Image: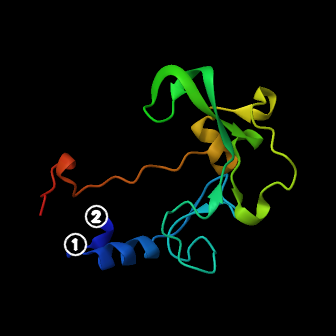
Amino acid sequence: MHYAGPTLTAANVQKGLFAKPAMEIRGSPNGLVGQGKTVGLPYDEYSGFGSDRALIWWDGNQEGPVQATNTEGKGVFEFLNEGKNVGYAGFTKTEPKFFDKSASVFQLEATDLFPGGVLPQPTPCRDCPVNGGSPS
């Protein structure tokens, strides 16, 4: 909602999101995550993560952080290719190694997702109600 400016409308949110620069992150087809044309796609990207996807399978026996709830439990999604995402054109033409633990991961460190392993600095919201701002 912050991207909308003083007038909250869907069009203003879209303008704000499309104006924000893309962020570098491992896993997207060209290393960028963002909206609009900021990720270098020839069309407007609305999801923020590009048209890339990861191949996954369900491992009902693996214990660890359950991705849907972020709690410890039994049963997780396993990601092929070390969790790397690919664009639709980049999907493997050979049979993927589903159900092969040696070809899958279920958890990555956050630092593994960013260039050089450096997490981006948080952007403080000085005017947010949680920080004493007015909820206009």
Measured from the top left, where is residue 53 in percent x and y?
Answer: 64, 54
Inter-mark Cα distance, 1 to 2: 7 Å
Badge 1: few (under 14), some or many (20 or more) residues near its Cα, within 10 Å? few
Residue drawn at the location 53% of the way across and 77% of the way down: 44
Measured from the top left, where is residue 76 in percent x and y?
Answer: 57, 29
Residue tagged 2: 1
Question: Which circle's residue, 1 or 2, is located before the other in the chain?
Answer: 2
Label 2: element kind: loop
Rendered view: 125 above or below 5: above
Task: Say whether residue 45 is left or right of residue 42.
Answer: left
Q: Quadrant of residue 96?
A: top right
Residue tagged 1: 8
Residue drawn at the location 80% of the way across and 28% of the way down: 102
Residue drawn at the location 29% of the way across and 72% of the way down: 4
Residue nearer the viewer, 39 or 96: 96
Label 1: element kind: loop
